[in-house]
Image (spheres, rainbow, N blue to C red):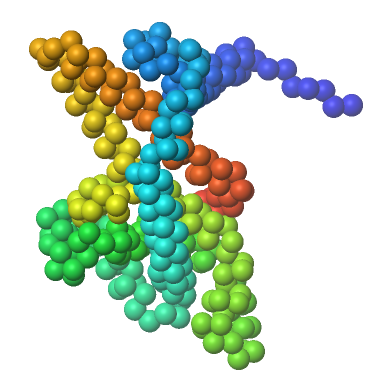
Amino acid sequence: MITAMKESRGDKVFLVSTYIYLCLALTVVVYPLIYILSASISDPQAVNSGAMWLFPKNVTLDGYKLVFENPKIWNGYLNTIIYTVIGTSLNLFVTLPAAYALSRSDFVGRQLFMGLILFTMFFSGGLVPSYLLIKNLGLINSMGALILPVAASVWNIVVARTFFQSTIPKELQEAAHMDGCTNLKLFIRIILPLSAPIVAVMALFYGVGHWNSYFPALIYLNDESKYPLQMVLRQILVLQEMSAETTGAAISGEVAIAMNSKAETASLIKYGVIVVSTLPIVAVYPFLQRYFVQGVMIGSVKG
């Protein structure tokens, strides 16, 4: 008969402290999510005055109506999807072959190449030289300015290389070569099908990065029709701040009412766009979570 081990007083105190800490951490994480969702369907006056602090007040869907009726938001949504799909595809096309080549012990000069790659992780030219480079390449105000400079991440290459080293048996590669398989066929037909976890992790890392990116668009794009969704959201936030500052100035009553109306509209659109722009990532993550955890643990702990 197995008897349960009696917990000491110290163990109970530690367990209670752990639960309290986890509850506080959960509150810190969940509260902003609930607040954004509630604010997106609440009366903007209740939100701005602080009357709505958790659950919705005076529920309205005007914010989502404004979002779905705004052509700039839909155009930004389309641009973001294009940038994310093409950018992530390019990232995987560059990162995975580079990581696999650097993981091969028979690759001559891999230490030198790895050192050069790691050097760029710690030292870079800075914003001004990067802008001049993009300008001289003729990529200003083009999709290439948002995708090509971030075609590969050194950290992701290191993680993927560690995954290949610790997961793919060397004997499997030798057996494939004995059967007459070339390095390209080995990578495409054998290595990639066995590397679903790290492929999913890299796709998630790069995809989220492209989806949330706005600074390169702020620097390199001049045409608003090419703005990603995050830049559209930034414009809405700037408009709201400008409206709030102008409303606080000494202006006539009619102008103040008009500016307040614009500020409330911007507030409605702001929270609605935040929810709409986050939904695709939230929807995709559950399908990649299993691969995400497995790939990160294997790629960053082993080796």
Quick check: 218 left or right of 162?
left
Quadrant including the N terminus: top right
| Residue found 29% across the figure and 20% down from its top | 261
Q: How many marks?
A: 0
Q: Residue at 12%, 55% (x, y): give it.
A: 128
Residue 254 vs residue 122, the one in the foreground: 254
Task: Give percent across and percent down for residue 24.
Answer: 49, 18
Quarter residue 126 falls in: bottom left
Q: Residue at x 35, y 59 (%)?
A: 153
Tell which residue pokes out farthest to the right in this image: 1
Taking the image as shown, residue 240 lies to the left or right of residue 184, namely left
Q: Relative to residue 24, is residue 104 depicted above or below?
A: below
Location of residue 282 in the rendering, given as x and y in whole percent from the top left corner: 53, 40
Which residue ends up furthest to the front in the rendered image? 254
Give x and y (percent) for residue 263: 28, 22
Name the residue: 42% across, 52% down: 78
Which is nearer the eye, 237 or 3? 237
Q: Is residue 176 above or below residue 68?
A: below
Would residue 103 be visible to someone looking at this image? Answer: no
Furthest residue in direction bottom, as rendered: 180
Q: Is residue 153 visible?
A: yes
Q: Position of residue 262 (x, y in %)?
A: 28, 24
